[in-house]
Amino acid sequence: MKTLIFASNPILHLSEPPIRKPKTQTFQPSITTTILKDKFKSHANAKGFSASNGSIGSTNKKANEENNKKKNDDNDEIPQEVYNRMIVRILVSVGFPMGLGLAFLQIFGVLKEKQLWDVPLWLPFTTTLLTFGASALGIAYGSLSTSFDAERKESLLGIEEVQRNWVEMWKEEDESQT
């Protein structure tokens, strides 16, 4: 089959293609964009940052200074010793259940691989759910089970501290809402 090529066709020239400059477009917001932006503007305020209580959104500088003094009196710094104990408790209460869960998965895998026991599928699922769930709850438990008094000796499991800190946490929350 023979192909006929016409030399007069400009598409078939083998010269270099012309250099084209890309067109740049700039975005100019229209009136509708501005209206929509104002309409869907977030009106939510974080707790303690609303304009009504005279803190961040307020223009009254004296009220801001008074509120800051009150907040600084209420929110004392956590001593470094308490902070270190809290970190250790969080690491233990998160790490132990997670390590236990990973060990169970490894044991179930070895038992199935060596064909000693055909582990039902629900068993690794349940143990993973329980151990990793306990690991997630370990963050809250580790922080609540720490005594916030630097001189006070705390117990091994921290159950007394959890009971005391739980009541204090909710008491502060109730006082701030009233």
Image (cartoon, helix red, strand yellow):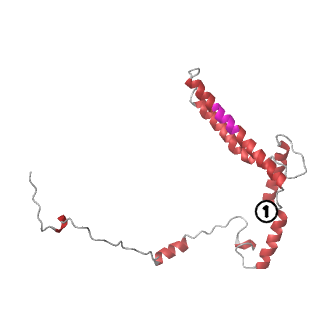
Disc 1 residue crowd, few under 14, some 14–19, many 20+, Cα 10 Å: few
Tell me the quadrant of the picture where the C terminus can be found: bottom right
Q: Is residue 109 left or right of residue 68?
A: left
Q: Residue at x 62, y 34 (%)?
A: 126
Q: Residue at x 81, y 67 (%)?
A: 71
Q: Is residue 36 left or right of residue 23?
A: right
- Residue 104 lies, with reference to residue 134, above or below; the image says above
- Residue 87 lies, with reference to residue 18, above or below; the image says above
Q: Residue 118 location, x and y as percent?
A: 56, 23
Please tell me which residue lies in front, 6 or 178: 6
Q: Residue 33 location, x and y as percent?
A: 48, 74
Please tell me which residue lies in front, 140 or 3: 3
Q: Which residue is mark 1?
A: 176
Q: Is residue 94 left or right of residue 42?
A: right
Q: Give the residue type that dot 1 points to.
A: Ser
Tell me where the magenta segment starts and ends, as one range: 97-104
Q: Quadrant of residue 128?
A: top right
Q: Residue 81 location, x and y as percent?
A: 84, 52
Q: Tell me, yes or no, if residue 166 can be seen here.
A: no
Q: Tell me, yes or no, if residue 94 can be seen here.
A: yes
Principal secondary structure, stretch drawn in magenta: helix
Q: Residue 117 location, x and y as percent?
A: 59, 21
